[in-house]
Image (cartoon, rainbow, N blue to C red):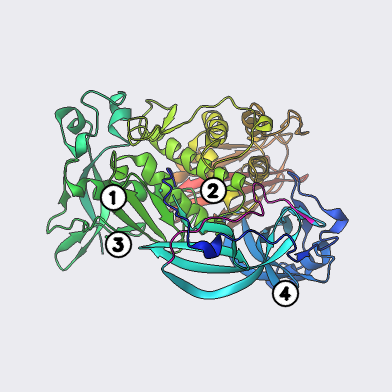
């Protein structure tokens, strides 16, 4: 959600009762081995059995010393580096709300475990209080009511969880203790192929014209003018053709009309979808184009995310609001103010909520975790726009915001992480965006986005900025042999997300392994590998980890492999020297 307009009204007096101070509180003792307390470090061990049953048994044995605690398997996600197992923690055979255990199993059987944020009798979900909440008008319950434990500062409170329909396409979750509403969640997170010819803003008219909002560059109730028309760019996007009708649908997204205002996605009997901003079709093609461009960019990095085709209603709100619904896997963009689907930042921001959903299914959580997700959505939107145009890179939502409708958000911050508190999910997004912007300027867009994508697979409901930074450090060692650890540390320590010293040491390459002609390899030519020591083997893996080629090298410090005959895609080349030095290099084949 890139903006928030509060419309929650107090439900009838049944939810206004004060919390009973004598409520039964459970205080599980010695929950984690070694009186575990959460820090920036994850628990790490080497698994002797990485099957689901074997992994579950090891997690129980290592970390759950209380016989009243147990794990239930939820799902498995697969990234290029690892398998990510998600478990629900139960206490006395009842789920603990938002208490998830993540176990990421890498190819060397090393397992990184993220545990919930409580220890002994205390539960420390940030900014969560035992006070009644307001609830929106409810229309109908969805599914069965679920008994669970709700974590509070005093302990675990017996509670009930129920989903309700609260409007067209809007589902809220209520957590109740008796007649007291303790938590209200709106689950929306707010932003045959053929080629279609289209005209779009890329990323928006202010950025490409390097202008600020005003003069000829205003919304003016969607009216077109020569200044705005001059910023439209011709492009092509994949669409669909059926029975002679061209429509806005492909493998990434499908345009739909599910919500008011009722505006059916444009279709035509020819592939020329050329509109100006005064026409509804302009927002339709803009939505499909930017979703497709960013979705295919993620795929090119080797990540099958979000893993499902999203529906997108380019005219999904009358007001100035956009959102993503994980339940319906649907994006909605508002027509209020500047139409949201005219600004690529809004489209990519909302789509990245779907990407996070596909990687970790980690909606909700602590206030800092939800702020982190908003910040990641902001950054990838900013990165996408900067790749299209170098102007006004200090702003996010350049066209949709920074005007009379809403102030937009900044991509620049000098805040100190140790001196802030989280009071709203948009309040400190700029801090994380600034860190990631600095990193991107040092190591490039692809490396930065790959590290973010790999790291979101293990997001937890209580994720902090610092924990996410440490995940990026860890994944850099696995993706890039630690080539960027100092860049990552430098970007995050400047704003005190990471401490000044974390014992990185100097990055060295004693084997002096070098790889030449990676560009030629993408065209099918030979790749040359040299080292200061004799090479032992070259192993080429698909991005999913399947061995494609293995070559033994005997008494030579130079060898080669060819990209000829390989399928298009991303590959990992593992280079091993005779005395055990290893370097992993990411390669692409066109």
Residue at mark 4 to residue at mark 1: CA–CA distance = 45 Å
User: Disc 4 marks which residue?
Assistant: 93
Of marks 2 and 1, the one in the foreground: 1
Residue at mark 3 to residue at mark 1: CA–CA distance = 13 Å
User: Disc 3 marks which residue?
Assistant: 258
Give above or below for 214 relative to 444.
above
Label annotation for residue 453:
2
Residue at mark 2 to residue at mark 4: CA–CA distance = 34 Å
Give above or below for 259 relative to 522.
below
The secondary element bearing badge 3 is classed as: loop
Which residue is at a point 51% across and 33% down the rendered structure image?
444
In terms of sequence position, does the residue under pointer 2 or pointer 4 come before the other?
Answer: 4
Figure quadrant of residue 223: top left
Prevailing secondary structure of the magenta residues: loop
Of marks 3 and 2, the one in the foreground: 3
In reply to whether residue 263 is colored magenta, the answer given is no
Relative depth, front residue between 548 and 95: 95
Label annotation for residue 318:
1
């Amino acid at each position: 959600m890139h903006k928030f307009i509060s419309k929650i009204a107090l439900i009838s007096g049944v939810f206004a009762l004060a919390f009973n101070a004598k409520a039964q509180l459970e205080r599980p003792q010695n929950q984690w081995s070694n009186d575990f307390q959460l820090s920036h470090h994850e628990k790490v061990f080497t698994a002797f059995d990485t099957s689901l049953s074997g992994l579950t048994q090891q997690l129980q044995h290592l970390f759950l010393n209380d016989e009243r605690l147990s794990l239930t398997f939820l799902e498995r996600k697969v990234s290029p580096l690892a398998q990510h197992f998600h478990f629900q923690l139960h206490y006395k055979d009842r789920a603990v709300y938002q208490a998830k255990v993540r176990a990421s199993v890498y190819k060397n059987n090393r397992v990184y475990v993220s545990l919930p944020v409580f220890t002994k009798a205390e539960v420390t979900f940030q900014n969560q209080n035992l006070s009644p909440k307001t609830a929106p008008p409810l229309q109908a319950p969805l599914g069965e009511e679920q008994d669970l434990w709700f974590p509070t500062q005093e302990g675990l409170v017996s509670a009930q969880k129920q989903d309700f329909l609260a409007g067209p396409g809007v589902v809220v979750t209520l957590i109740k203790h008796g007649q007291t509403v303790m938590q209200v969640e709106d689950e929306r997170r707010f932003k045959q192929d053929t080629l279609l010819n289209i005209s779009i803003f890329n990323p928006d008219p202010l950025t490409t014209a390097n202008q600020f909002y005003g003069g000829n560059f205003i919304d003016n109730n969607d009216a077109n003018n020569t200044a705005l028309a001059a910023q439209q760019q011709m492009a092509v996007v994949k669409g669909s053709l059926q029975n002679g009708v061209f429509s806005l649908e492909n493998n990434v997204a499908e345009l739909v009309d599910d919500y008011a205002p009722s505006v059916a996605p444009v279709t035509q009997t020819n592939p020329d979808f050329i509109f100006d901003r005064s026409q509804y079709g302009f927002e339709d093609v803009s939505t499909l184009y930017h979703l497709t461009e960013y979705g295919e960019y993620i795929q090119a990095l080797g990540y099958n995310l979000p893993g499902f085709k999203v529906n997108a209603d380019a005219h999904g709100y009358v007001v100035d609001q956009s959102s993503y619904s994980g339940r319906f896997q649907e994006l909605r963009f508002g027509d209020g103010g500047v139409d949201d689907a005219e600004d690529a930042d809004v489209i990519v921001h909302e789509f990245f909520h779907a990407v996070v959903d596909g990687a970790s299914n980690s909606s909700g959580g602590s206030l800092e975790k939800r702020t982190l997700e908003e910040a990641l959505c902001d950054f990838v939107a900013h990165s996408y726009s900067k790749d299209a145009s170098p102007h006004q890179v200090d702003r996010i939502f350049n066209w949709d915001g920074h005007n009379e409708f809403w102030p937009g958000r900044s991509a620049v911050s000098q805040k100190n992480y140790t001196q802030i508190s989280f009071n709203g999910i948009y309040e400190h997004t700029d801090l994380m965006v600034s860190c990631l912007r600095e990193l991107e300027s040092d190591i490039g867009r692809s490396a930065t986005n790959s590290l973010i994508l790999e790291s979101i697979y293990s997001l937890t409901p209580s994720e902090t900025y610092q924990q996410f930074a440490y995940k990026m450090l860890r994944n850099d060692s696995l993706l890039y042999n630690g080539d960027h650890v100092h860049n990552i540390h430098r970007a995050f320590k400047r704003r005190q997300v990471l401490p000044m010293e974390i014992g990185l040491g100097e990055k060295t390459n004693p084997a002096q392994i070098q790889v030449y002609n990676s560009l030629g390899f993408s065209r099918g030519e030979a790749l040359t590998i040299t080292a200061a020591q004799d090479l032992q083997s070259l192993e080429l893996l698909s991005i999913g980890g399947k061995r494609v080629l293995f070559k033994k090298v005997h008494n030579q410090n130079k060898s080669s492999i060819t990209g000829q005959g390989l399928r298009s895609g991303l590959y990992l080349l593992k280079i091993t020297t005779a005395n055990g030095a290893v370097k992993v290099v990411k390669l692409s084949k066109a």
